[in-house]
Amino acid sequence: MPFPADAATRWSLQGRVFLVTGASAGIGAAVAQELLGFGATVVAAARRPEPLQAAVDAWQQEGLDAHAVAADVSTAAGRQALLAEVRARHGRLDGLVNNVGTNIRKPTADYQEGEYQHVMQTNLDSAFALCQLVYPLLKESGAGSIVNIASVAGLTHVRTGAVYGMTKAAMVQLTRYLAAEWAPDHIRVNCVAPWYIQTPLAAGVLSNEAYRAEVISRTPMGRVGEPQEVAAAVAFMCLPAASYITGQTLAVDGGFVGHGF
């Protein structure tokens, strides 16, 4: 697609439809709000209907074009129901943000089979399967965009557990493969890899003051990130302004990954 000549078009998502998973709180809610602010219509998906609907109600009260779909995207049935809703309500899709994620923090040797499957299905299987399901719609768009929310745990060792790190590393590699495979179909695929962000998923470990101090000591910018800072990076990847960017992983980490001793 040609690069938009005017700035207003480059920095707008007006008329475009995006699907964001895990959109009821944390990074997912921030991403949905950021895309809405650029004029997009957002299908916000999450497993728990009550907090999801509360978030969507708040956006709608601001005049933003969002609606909620309660679905567990770690299951095939949940993904199919979500896609059916997108097709029925909009008949099109321009972008997907694979944000939903979970973790069970424990030593590798202590992991049980059910725990392993739960993390893999939620973080990785959902992303791969949703990419497959939305591919025809993104191809029809002519300017499709996928952003996968990985983690610095997929780029280097952190103390968040082997299984979580495996899922996030796989999302980075999935991003590279799909970017090359689907570029002829005018679908861009990128990845954002956050470090510790003030979210419900990180709240437990960050409530330990000693651990939080150690995290901050390894972060050159000297603080934990905010969901809106991740959301801004995601939105940029989705904008026409980023039309020649694909297959990339952007660490939103306050300098953590590049911090040597």
Image (spheres, grey):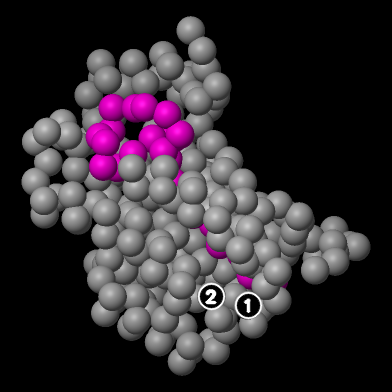
Using a 10 Å C-alpha cutoff, classify the residue at mark 2 as few (fewer than 14 neighbours), some (14 to 19) or many (20 or more): many
Image position of 251 (left or right of 203)? right
Residue 253: image location, x then y, percent: 50, 31
Answer with the quarter of the image where residue 258 lies: top right
Residue 66 appears in the figure? no
Residue at the spot 42% in from the left edge and 29% down from the top edge: 156
How far apart are the alpha carbons under marks 1 and 2?
A: 6 Å
Residue 206: image location, x then y, percent: 28, 29
Answer with the quarter of the image where residue 146 lies: bottom right
Q: Is residue 218 above or below residue 148?
A: above
Helix, strand or loop at label 1? It is helix
* Nearer to us in this view, 213 or 165: 165
Image position of 143 (left or right of 82)? right
Q: Is residue 136 above or below residue 73?
A: below
Query: Looking at the rendering, in which quadrant would you find the N terminus?
Result: bottom right
Asked whether the residues under the numbered discs 1 and 2 touch, taking CB atoms below 8 Å apart as contact, a structural biologist would say yes
Using a 10 Å C-alpha cutoff, classify the residue at mark 1 as few (fewer than 14 neighbours), some (14 to 19) or many (20 or more): some
- Per the rendered image, the range of residues in magenta is 143-165
Residue 250: image location, x then y, percent: 58, 40
Residue topped by disc 1: 139
Residue at the spot 53% in from the left edge and 75% down from the top edge: 135
Image position of 14 (left or right of 222)? right
* View extreme (right): residue: 5
Residue at the spot 12% in from the left edge and 41% down from the top edge: 111
Residue 86 appears in the figure? yes
Going by the numbered disc 2, the residue's amino acid type is Tyr
- Kindly identify which numbered label has been placed on residue 135: 2
Residue at the spot 90% in from the left edge and 62% down from the top edge: 5
* Nearer to us in this view, 149 or 183: 183
Helix, strand or loop at label 2? It is helix
